[in-house]
Every structure is written in structure tokens, then in C-alpha cells.
């Protein structure tokens, strides 16, 4: 929405002008990706509202503040919930890969330009190869993890939040 006003609050509120209406989803994303990659056990004690993993003595969720007295804990994260986090992760990854690829294509185009039309020292094939290697690396980094990642974040987070919203509506009924 307010894409242009986003730069001064990027660090705090995600990137590319998208602020999740569910801040705890952003904070849980990394944990859920660990769970999706099976790096942590599937079973455990989870918040009955947001499905954050709780310690044995937690009586309130540190992510969504739900109290275990109001929302009994569950012993696994529902698949539909995991799918929402997966949608965010894979959308973002796709954008990062596309961005990195764009950077490489650009570096290749510059390489070809240098070899064929480069005037003077720019036409030196050794310099062109250097550009391809070093320029390729930096352009891939710039377009992938820096630039396209922001659009990927915003698209992916929107997708995840929409899935979470419909999950909540299904689980708790319309508000
Ligand atoms: Zn919670």
C-alpha cells in the first residue's frame, strides 16, 4: 500500500511497505520453518491460539499473549497452519532466486557488451571476465537477497496472512 513511506521503518516492520496485521506470525516464521524442515520435534506443547512452542511452565504465550487457561495447549501444530508458513517461505525464495538470476543475466549482458563493443581497456577480455565474476556476484546479491527479497517478503507475507485469517475464521468462526 504505502510503498514509498516504508524505507524509514523497514527494520521494524518488515519490508516493501507491508506490515502484517498479525505481528506474531512474523516472529514465528523462523520457528515454523525449522519445524517444516524437521529440525525440531513435531510433538511438544504448543500455544492453543498461535501454535508457538511453549516451555513446560509457560502459562501465557510469549508470542500472542494467549493464556493457557483460556486456550488449552495442543501437542502438535496443525498442517493447515504449517502450510501457511510454507507458502510464505517458498514465495519469498522464488523471488530471491528470480532476482539473483536477473543479476546474473545483467552481468552476462555487460560481459557481452564489453567483449564486443567495449572501447579501449573496457574491451579487454580479462577485464570482461573479471566483471562477469565479481559483477555477477554482486548483481546477484543486489537483485536477489536485497531487492527482489523485499517484494518476495511482501507477497509471501500477504499469502501467509490470508491463509491464517481463513484458518482463524474456520477454527473460531467469524468475529
Ligand atoms: Zn500464542
Image (tube, grey):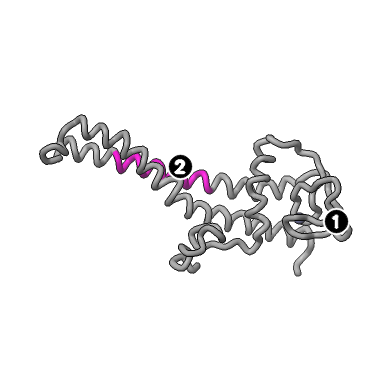
> In this view, which residue lies farthest toward the left?
120
Q: Is residue 174 magenta?
A: no
| Label placed on residue 132 | none
Task: Using the image as rendered, state which of residue 95 and residue 63 is in the foreground.
Answer: 63
Crowding at mark 1 (Cα within 10 Å: few <14, some 14-19, many 20+):
some
Left or right: residue 108 versus residue 20 is left
| Label disc, if present, on residue 68 of the rendered structure | 1
Q: Main secondary structure of the magenta part?
A: helix
Mark 2 vs mark 1: give the one in front. Answer: 1
Q: Which residues are magenta?
A: 92-107
Q: Quadrant of the C terminus?
A: bottom right
Q: Residue furthest right?
A: 69
Residue 133 placed where, x, y %?
A: 31, 33
Ligand 1 quadrant in view: bottom right
- What's the residue at 75%, 36% (across, down)? 41
Describe the element under mark 1 as helix, strand or loop: loop
Q: Quadrant of residue 172?
A: bottom right
Q: Is mark 2 within 8 Å of ligand 1?
A: no
**Residue 114: where, in percent of width, then height?**
19, 38
The residue located at (46%, 46%) in the rendering is 145
Amino acid at each position: 500500500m504505502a510503498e514509498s513511506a516504508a524505507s524509514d521503518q523497514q527494520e521494524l516492520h518488515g519490508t516493501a511497505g507491508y506490515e502484517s496485521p498479525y505481528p506474531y506470525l512474523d516472529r514465528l516464521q523462523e520457528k515454523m520453518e525449522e519445524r517444516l524442515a524437521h529440525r525440531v520435534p513435531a510433538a511438544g506443547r504448543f500455544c492453543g491460539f498461535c501454535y508457538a512452542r511453549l516451555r513446560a511452565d509457560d502459562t501465557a504465550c510469549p508470542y500472542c499473549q494467549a493464556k493457557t487457561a483460556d486456550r488449552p495447549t495442543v501437542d502438535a501444530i496443525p498442517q493447515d497452519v504449517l502450510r501457511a508458513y510454507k507458502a510464505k517461505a517458498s514465495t519469498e525464495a522464488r523471488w530471491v532466486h528470480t532476482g539473483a538470476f536477473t543479476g546474473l543475466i545483467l552481468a552476462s549482458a555487460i560481459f557481452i557488451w564489453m567483449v564486443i563493443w567495449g572501447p579501449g581497456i573496457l574491451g579487454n577480455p580479462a577485464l570482461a571476465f573479471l566483471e562477469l565474476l565479481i559483477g555477477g556476484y554482486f548483481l546477484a546479491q543486489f537483485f536477489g537477497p536485497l531487492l527482489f527479497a523485499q517484494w518476495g517478503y511482501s507477497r509471501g507475507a500477504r499469502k501467509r496472512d490470508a491463509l491464517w485469517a481463513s484458518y482463524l475464521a474456520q477454527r473460531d468462526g467469524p468475529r
